[in-house]
């Protein structure tokens, strides 16, 4: 089955039809509102749903090509629940990093047998509440030194706070210090970073500036939202 062809013949849903029909009955404004509702809300929402379903289908096809038993997922309740939860989250965001994190999370649930329901639900809830900067900053602090090297930036520092490395990698954050502190504190409060925003201005040696600051839970979360190693027979 080609999901792209199937999606083309699926327009709207029962809820939208009911709402649109109700709105269209309002004297004087019903016709205008029902058309505006369709143009501004339904069509973009339907497109988002189609996009995420196509991406999920593509990822499953990729696994199937590597001898993964796709049919086994039909009875995997955790996988099915995760797909539903992730799809709803994806429909409420346009940020590509979040959508990719959700797609990778679904793949992790499909291929990793060690994940439990509570952990998966917690991690998906993290993605839902985060914006793309939560993900970028967390990933950076997992290995500041290697991230700087990968971007062709110097990782040599004499003294300073962790902000020296962060702002070198993300210069656009240097003028958004309060925003950055808020992100750092939220990651710390959720147990993903081992330090709160205070570490940005805490004086330390050069090696301390580029030290990893993700907690064990933070590393597990990053593994969950990173594309897993594809399955092989």
Image: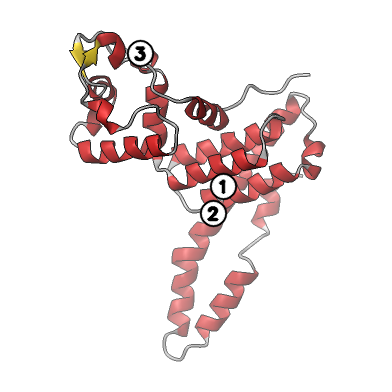
Which of the marked residues, 3 or 1, is nearer the chain's N terminus?
1
Q: Is residue 223 left or right of residue 115?
A: left
Q: Are marks 2 and 1 in contact (CB under 8 Å)?
A: yes
> Which quadrant would the N terminus be assigned to in this image?
top right
Q: Nearer the viewer, residue 92 or 209?
A: 209
Local packing at callout 3 (Cα closer than 10 Å; few below 14, some 14-19, many 20+) is many
Label 3 vs label 1, nearer the camera: 3
Q: Which residue corresponds to the image point at 58% horizontal and 34% vertical from the top-left?
A: 104
**Which SS class for mark 3?**
helix
Q: CA distance from mark 3 to mark 1?
A: 35 Å
Q: Is residue 153 left or right of residue 158?
A: right
Q: Position of residue 5 (x, y in %)?
A: 69, 50
Question: Where is residue 202, by image quadrant?
Answer: top left
Q: Nearer the viewer, residue 202 or 9?
A: 202
Q: Position of residue 71 (x, y in %)?
A: 81, 38
Q: Is residue 17 above or below residue 201?
A: below
Q: Position of residue 45 (x, y in %)?
A: 51, 58
**Which SS class for mark 1?**
helix
Q: Are marks 2 and 3 in contact (CB under 8 Å)?
A: no
Q: Which residue corresponds to the image point at 25% horizontal and 8% vertical from the top-left?
A: 156
On the image, numbered disc 1 is attached to which residue?
51
Q: Which mark is residue 145?
A: 3
On the image, numbered disc 2 is attached to which residue?
47
Local packing at callout 2 (Cα closer than 10 Å; few below 14, some 14-19, many 20+) is few
Q: CA distance from mark 2 to mark 3?
A: 40 Å
Q: Is residue 172 above or below residue 28?
A: above
Q: CA distance from mark 2 to mark 1?
A: 6 Å
């Amino acid at each position: 089955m080609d999901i792209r062809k199937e999606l083309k013949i699926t327009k709207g849903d029962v809820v939208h039809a009911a709402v649109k029909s109700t709105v269209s009955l309002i004297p004087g404004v019903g016709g205008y509102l029902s058309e505006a509702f369709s143009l501004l809300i339904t069509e973009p929402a339907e497109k988002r749903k189609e996009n995420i379903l196509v991406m999920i289908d593509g990822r499953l096809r990729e696994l199937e090509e590597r001898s993964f038993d796709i049919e086994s997922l039909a009875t995997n309740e955790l996988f099915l629940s995760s797909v539903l939860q992730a799809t709803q989250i994806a429909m409420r965001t346009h940020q590509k990093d979040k959508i990719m994190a959700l797609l990778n999370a679904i793949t992790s649930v499909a291929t990793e047998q060690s994940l439990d329901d509570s952990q998966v639900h917690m991690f998906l809830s993290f993605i839902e509440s985060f914006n793309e900067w939560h993900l970028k900053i967390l990933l950076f602090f997992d290995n500041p030194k290697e991230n700087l090297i990968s971007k062709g930036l110097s990782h040599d520092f004499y003294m300073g706070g962790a902000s020296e490395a962060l702002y070198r990698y993300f210069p656009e954050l240097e003028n958004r210090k309060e925003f950055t502190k808020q992100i750092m504190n939220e990651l710390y409060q959720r147990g993903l970073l081992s330090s709160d925003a205070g570490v940005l201005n805490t004086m330390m040696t050069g090696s301390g500036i580029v030290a990893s600051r993700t907690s064990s839970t933070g590393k597990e979360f990053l593994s969950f939202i990173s594309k897993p190693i594809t399955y092989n027979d």
